[in-house]
Image: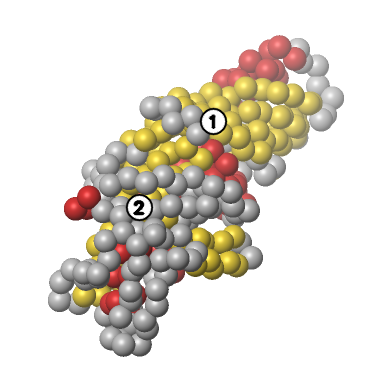
């Protein structure tokens, strides 16, 4: 059950909408800060950045261009270090996101006889990604355009070369080397979005099935996701609480945590009805807000005014 909350708990602004049979089920949205946090977490793992390190393939023209520039034959061109990038993101209404990644690259080039090139380059990667859906209907971000911009180039060893010529050569080299980094990052982030179409076991008593109810909507403030959720027992029978008719999810307007999760009271009631043996719990949660907090944030469930009795 915790997997459900972890998957959906990445938004910060939730608004009511209609799900199956006109009842609100699960509502979520993610704003720019939420997406940046997800991407930062991916980059901090280290393996994404390490995938860029190493020898630059001769196929992208890097060795040839820089070799001609330096008047020598480069036998090896290697990215030695990539600093942890600084990420910024802007939502593009009706399109997707504009992603900017600033990082510093340390490049080393060698000839047959000695090291001939030692560069430290500050570079910005600017990419536009469109929010689309895969064959299963799950949302995913697809890179449509990616460019690199040199911010500062520092030659760490003595070599007579004009800055404009060096910048041109690096400008031709970096898109093929650094833009795949954006693809890799989004390929890691997309599974978090695609799990909005999934089945999650509820112990040994049944499961929770949730799907995307409609196309995600991108505004200047957020990406909105409207989900349908159904609770079923092991025989595939839908589990509902017939005494519950609350359909509106309402959330606190001001919260300390940037992440919130909105659940229909009826959905929560159905999950608890399946998990708990009859008679083990009888609680009226209509007139209170139930909060669960931990070190990483909090989850607030604020039901409607109508009582929902769990039996």
Mark in front: 2 vs 1 = 2
Residue 264's place in the image compared with 159, above or below, is below
Give the residue number, with chain letter if any, for mark 2.
248
Q: Residue at x 66, y 28 (%)?
A: 123
Q: Say which quarter of the image contains residue 108.
A: top right
Q: Residue at x 69, y 42 (%)?
A: 83
Counting other residues with Cα less than 10 Å from the Cα at mark 1, is it few (<14), some (14-19), or many (20 or more)? some
Q: Is residue 88 visible?
A: yes
Give the residue number, with chain letter if any, for mark 1.
90
In this view of the protein, which residue sits in the foreground, 265 or 78? 265
Label 2: which secondary element: loop
In this view of the protein, which residue sits in the foreground, 168 or 243? 243
Q: Residue at x 60, y 35 (%)?
A: 88
In this view of the protein, which residue sits in the foreground, 73 or 164? 164
The answer for how far apart the CA atoms under marks 2 and 1 are is 30 Å
Residue 117: % across, % down:
74, 29
Residue 90's place in the image compared with 164, above or below, is below
């Amino acid at each position: 059950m915790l997997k459900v909350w972890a998957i959906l708990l990445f938004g910060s602004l939730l608004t009511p909408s209609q799900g199956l049979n006109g009842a609100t089920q699960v509502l979520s949205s993610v704003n720019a800060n939420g997406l940046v946090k997800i991407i930062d977490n991916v980059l901090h793992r280290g393996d994404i950045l390490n995938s860029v390190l190493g020898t630059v393939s001769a196929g992208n023209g890097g060795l040839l261009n820089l070799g001609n520039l330096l008047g020598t034959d480069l036998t090896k061109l290697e990215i030695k270090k990539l600093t942890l990038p600084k990420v910024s993101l802007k939502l593009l209404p009706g399109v997707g996101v504009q992603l900017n990644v600033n990082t510093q690259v340390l490049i080393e080039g060698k000839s047959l006889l000695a090291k001939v090139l030692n560069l430290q380059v500050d570079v910005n990667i600017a990419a536009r990604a469109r929010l689309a859906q895969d064959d299963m209907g799950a949302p995913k971000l697809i890179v449509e355009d990616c460019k690199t911009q040199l911010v500062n180039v520092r030659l760490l060893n003595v070599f007579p070369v004009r800055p404009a010529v060096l910048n041109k050569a690096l400008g031709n080299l970096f898109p093929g080397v650094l833009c795949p980094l954006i693809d890799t990052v989004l390929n890691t982030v997309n599974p978090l979005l695609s799990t909005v179409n999934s089945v999650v076991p509820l112990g040994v008593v049944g499961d929770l099935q949730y799907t995307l109810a409609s196309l995600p909507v991108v505004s200047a403030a957020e990406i909105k996701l409207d989900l349908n959720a159904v609770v079923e027992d092991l025989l595939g029978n839908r589990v509902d609480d017939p005494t519950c008719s609350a359909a509106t999810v309402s959330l606190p307007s001001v919260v300390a945590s940037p992440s919130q999760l909105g659940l229909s009271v009826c959905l929560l009631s159905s999950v608890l009805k399946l998990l708990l043996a009859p008679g083990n719990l009888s609680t009226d949660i209509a007139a209170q807000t139930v909060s669960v907090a931990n070190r990483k944030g909090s989850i607030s469930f604020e039901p409607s005014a109508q009582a929902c009795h769990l039996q």
